[in-house]
Amino acid sequence: MKKIRTAIYSFLLVLSFIFSALTIPLSTGYDLGVHDASVFYSTQYLMQPTELDEIHYALQQVRNMFSQQQIIYFLPTSPPFPLYAEPVYGHLENFEAQTTLSLLTSQIVDCEVNHEFSTVFYYGHQNMRGVGLPWPERSYGFVEQAAPDADPETVGTIWDSDIYYAPTVDNHHFIFLWTCNSGNTAGSLDPLHGMPISWTRQNLSTDGYHDPDESSYCFISFQNHSATFIENLGVPNQIYKYWMVFFYYYALQLQYSINDALDYASYAVGYDGGWSDPDNRLSGDGYPYLWYGGGNLTEGGYWGKMRIYGNGDIHLPVTRGEWVT
């Protein structure tokens, strides 16, 4: 049975490549107002030149994988005949180096009103502010687009409360913020703080890998400091950008769950034990990631680890077949 399922999916995947090549321009974003949504954001603030290059290539690669996910409609003949296709992600945008509060808010509203399942990826830096509670219960934010050497006083922040108070945020089911500290806490509503609860409006499990809840939401970010895409992850010729691209490859092209994609991305970069490998610098005990200096921090190693909130057993919407009725 597993071989049959694999063969069917391989057939659908080949068809999806054909249809996506015919219908979807890969170099630009689009919003067709149907089905699901995926949106990418980043900032140039405090980035190294080589890091900006890796961000560019990673976001392009992953966005293209999203664009290849197709709903293929078949006539109920024998054998079934593929008639036409529509993109699974009818809203797909890459706002590399364009992140602003107004843009993010408008995208959230569009995704909530016109789409069924939404994902977000952001790469950049963060801010935090107190809410009268002990550490790590803080209000967290991530920064808007700014030049790499911009004056910190001029760089805007998008706060967790900005996201929570955007209209009806409840269909953003998978959020991946590659930034420091946004994974420190699940947060709460009294007082309002925390990225996981602000994006999902759910009280998520604090360990979505080992102890997933039963929700349809998953949130990933870093506790304390985050690694940069250009840092080596302790395996020859492997950097964190490769891990990120592999993660989406397994989640989209091979239809793995979030947790399985965490495992297989880790295998792919040389961690033989997957996500649970004791040498995996993203999980377990974490690692003192290299920082190149800037943003009130001197150059050096700063400890952090990736955190998985909610239900890591969920799957992203991917290529599928449906009958024409």
Image (tube, rainbow, N blue to C red):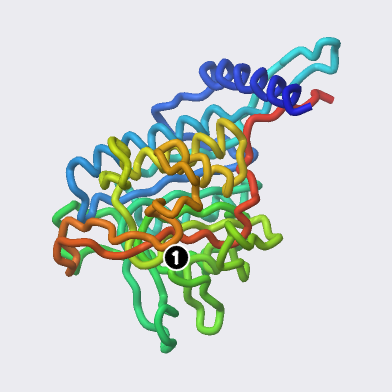
Q: Quadrant of the N terminus?
A: top right
- 132 versus 69 height, above or below: below
What residue does disc 1 label?
183
Question: In which quarter of the view is residue 34 placed?
Answer: top right
Q: Position of residue 77 (x, y in %)?
A: 85, 12
- 133 versus 250 height, above or below: below
Q: Position of residue 261 (x, y in %)?
A: 54, 43
Residue kind at label 1, given as amino acid type: Gly
- 54 versus 27 height, above or below: below
Q: Residue at x 59, y 18 (%)?
A: 19
Question: In which quarter of the view is residue 297 placed?
Answer: bottom left
Q: Residue furthest bottom?
A: 132
Q: Is residue 295 left or right of residue 113?
A: left
Q: Residue at x 58, y 54 (%)?
A: 172
Q: Quadrant of the C terminus?
A: top right
Give SS at disc 1: loop
Q: Is residue 32 left or right of residue 160?
A: right
Q: Is residue 182 left or right of residue 57?
A: right
Q: Residue at x 71, y 60 (%)?
A: 214
In the image, 302 versus 171, the foreground residue is 302
Q: Residues within 10 Å of mark 1 (few under 14, many from 20)?
A: many
Residue 169 makes an appearance in the image: no
